[in-house]
Amino acid sequence: MSEATDIRQAMQRFGIIGHSEPLIEAVGRALRVAPIDLSVLVNGESGTGKEFFPKIIHAYSPRKHAKYIAVNCGAIPEGTIDSELFGHEKGAFTGAVSDRKGYFEEADGGTIFLDEVAELPLTTQARLLRVLETGEFIRVGSSQVSKANVRIVAATNVDMAKAVAEGKFREDLYYRLSTVTIPVPPLRDRGADISLLARKFAADFAERYHMPRIEFSPDALMELQHYRWPGNVRQLKNVVEQIALFEAGETIGESMLDRYLPRETTSLVSTHDPDDSCSTTTSADREVLVGMILNLRNEVARLASRIDALEGRSVRALTCHPVIEKFDPAEEETPMVKSLVKYEPYASPLTSVRPVVVSEPRTLEDTEKETIMRSLERNGGRRKATAKELNISERTLYRKIKEYGIE
């Protein structure tokens, strides 16, 4: 079987879409290194799909029948990261009511994927280096040396050479992790793959939610390919799903598409503390905000559906044309509602007049704050559950809570 055939089969197996040369080369490198038990570092911007490559490496390695554990190093608080990775003994710290195995013990004989590895504290980096060199580690609160036979695949969107130069990442660990590197191309360098992905996301959304499918005009597809996509594949998916929701059944032209593409020079998330490295506006922040807005709009759509159900009418499809119009009884039988705001609210039995809903202009910051507050309420104030629901790290959530003064 040829290497090209192997690459196509691997891409099909893991749902990787595209024909661009940089992507094919990255998958080929993963397949070539998979049978050889070396550490691998996957480099790429946020949202490029780095998480697929450790899965390919594990699935095509001799360890494929053992455990595969993915760990997001950026989502685990610094005070508990050692316990999560290496385990702890009973009484090692407050709350350690029993012995606990860490991820390295759980994955013995298999593969561990360390995502956002550049976020590891320096003390944890030293422990990880020892595991890479000798396979040995010590549980938190223990003096007994344990061993684990684990293959490590790491990923980062950070310039590791710069992090090493700034003293934020150990040089010896960097060289240990990067025995083999796999560069994952950003979406803007994948050319026609953007059109393939956009059509696939649109089709998946229509099938999942039983909605009419959108189509893209040639001009719209060309504009998608020329956009820089700072959030990469994740951002493209969010944008296409917004369009699929609010323009269901339409053919998307260039002018319609422009309403959904954020300005590349405009930040969607404001920053207030330039000294806080976590507060710098990144593509990941923009992606998170787009996702929050989509979630909020979905809530609006569900609310409108409930109101229609209470009135005994069928659920009406919503589109994204924010035009505020007065209620017209002649439109009572119109099958489509063409505005987020223009729907008939529940009529109180105390009045025969249907109110016209007029929304005040809201900033993106207001929308983001409200989304976070609602999620906190739904999760009883539990920040870990809230961060998971919003698909952001706990660090980002803590920063947003502080930034907006949320109690």
Image (cartoon, rainbow, N blue to C red):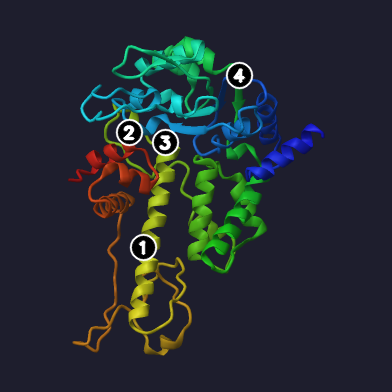
Kind of element beneath mark 2: helix
Q: Position of residue 66 (x, y in %)?
A: 56, 31
- Residues under numbered marks 2 and 4 in contact, where contact means CB atoms less than 8 Å apart: no
**Category of crowding for the residue at label 4, using alpha-carbon neighbours closer than 10 angstroms: few (below 14), some (14–19), many (at least 20):** some
**Which is more N-terminal, label 1 or label 2?**
2
Q: CA distance from mark 3 to mark 2?
A: 9 Å
Q: CA distance from mark 3 to mark 1?
A: 26 Å
The disc labelled 1 sits on which kind of residue? Glu
In front of the other: 186 or 156: 156
Q: CA distance from mark 2 to mark 4?
A: 35 Å
- Residues under numbered marks 3 and 2 in contact, where contact means CB atoms less than 8 Å apart: no
In front of the other: 56 or 344: 56
Q: CA distance from mark 3 to mark 4?
A: 32 Å
Choose mark 3 or mark 1, whichever is in front.
Answer: 1
The disc labelled 3 sits on which kind of residue? Thr
Q: Position of residue 219 (x, y in %)?
A: 64, 56
Disc 1 marks which residue? 299
Choose mark 3 or mark 4, whichever is in front.
Answer: 4
Q: Determine which quarter of the picture holds residue 60.
A: top right
Kind of element beneath mark 4: loop
- Residues under numbered marks 3 and 4 in contact, where contact means CB atoms less than 8 Å apart: no
- Residues under numbered marks 3 and 1 in contact, where contact means CB atoms less than 8 Å apart: no
The disc labelled 4 sits on which kind of residue? Leu
Q: Residue at x 35, y 42 (%)?
A: 269
Q: CA distance from mark 1 to mark 4?
A: 47 Å
Q: Position of residue 270 (x, y in %)?
A: 32, 41
**Which is more N-terminal, label 4 or label 2?**
4
**Category of crowding for the residue at label 3, using alpha-carbon neighbours closer than 10 angstroms: few (below 14), some (14–19), many (at least 20):** some
Q: Is residue 98 left or right of residue 109?
A: left
Disc 3 marks which residue? 282
Disc 4 marks which residue? 38
In what quadrant of the picture does the N terminus appear?
A: top right
